[in-house]
Amino acid sequence: MKITLAQAMGTCFGVQDAIDMALDPAFKDRLTIVGQLVHNPQTTERLKANGVRIVERDQVDQITTEAVMITAHGASDGTKQMLRDKGFTVYDATCPLVIRLHKLARFLEREGYFPVVIGEASHVEVRGVVGNLRSAVVVHDEADIDQLQGHRRIGVVSQTTNRPEMVQRLLAAIRAKPWVEDMRFCDTICQPVKERQQAIEVLLGQDIDLGIVIGGRNSANTRKLQELIADRGIEVHHIEDPEHLEDAWFVGKKHVGITAGTSTPQDVIEAVHARVRAIIAAQPAA
Ligand code: SF4
């Protein structure tokens, strides 16, 4: 059985920079991260082992350090100010591509467009963007578009991890509404995410018959990599670490493709790759 690793996968620069900031020795035992810095259990454990505390956004009252960190997904200015007002020193690990998303959403609003964010309303990145706008609608599927009734000039941005074809489908549906006179779209899907999605297309072009996608269960971009493979009717499994691999998945398969989301560390990818090799080696010859 052949194994192919995706040409682009694993930790992106935004996540890596945020991890490096949190693991700076100057912060040892004196930093609290508000929310998950990355959607990856191994990295979260590594941070805790280095004395970094992690609280959810509704647990701010439990923070006991003076230094707090905003995650790579960003936050609204209101959230950052609320933390400063409580006396914390705020260190901002927001990814530059998320900052760009915030800026473009505000630019569209300033230009007189009604802002629309294509994405998941509950996702921390989307909540941060919406929190910086006077008013906005989050569109995740066609049914959400009816909330735009009466808005003739629509300015659209996308959550950074969306699939381009999903965004294009929703843009066409918005444009088709009779009340929409002018629609402007700023493409804010991030380049590392696009590269990881394009690498899946390359894998699919090589006739894989099994996909292994590595990443946190709550990682939006990892789930989308899995969807890309599943949409072609190919068996695919989303795992967080090598222990989740099951020997039975590999029986009778010819070509396995491996990929990983933007917050999956290289050592986890290597451990999964090694375990896949071991499972295949232990199978009886066909
Ligand atoms: S996935 Fe893209 S937007 Fe998100 S942290 Fe990585 S580089 Fe930044």
Image (cartoon, grey):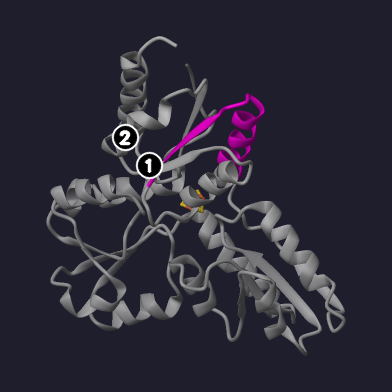
Q: Residues within 10 Å of mark 2 (few under 14, many from 20)?
A: some
Q: Nearer the viewer, residue 261 or 272?
A: 272
Q: How crowded is mark 1: few (under 14 residues within 10 Å), some or many (20 or more)?
A: many
Q: Distance between the residues labelled 1 and 2?
A: 7 Å
Q: Mark 1 points at which residue?
A: 264
What type is the residue that disc 2 sits on?
Val
State the residue lying farthest toward the bottom. Answer: 150
Q: Mark 2 points at which residue?
A: 268
Residue at point 41%, 57% (across, down): 72
86 left or right, relative to 254 = left
Mark 1–mark 2 contact, CB under 8 Å? Answer: yes
Judging from the image, what secondary structure is the residue with disc 2 in? Answer: helix
Q: Is residue 273 above or below residue 193?
A: above
Q: Give the range drawn in magenta.
A: 194-215
Q: Is residue 129 above or below residue 52?
A: below
Residue at point 27%, 52% (across, down): 22
What type is the residue that disc 1 sits on?
Thr
Q: Quadrant of residue 242?
A: top left
Give the image location of residue 191, x and y in percent: 60, 45
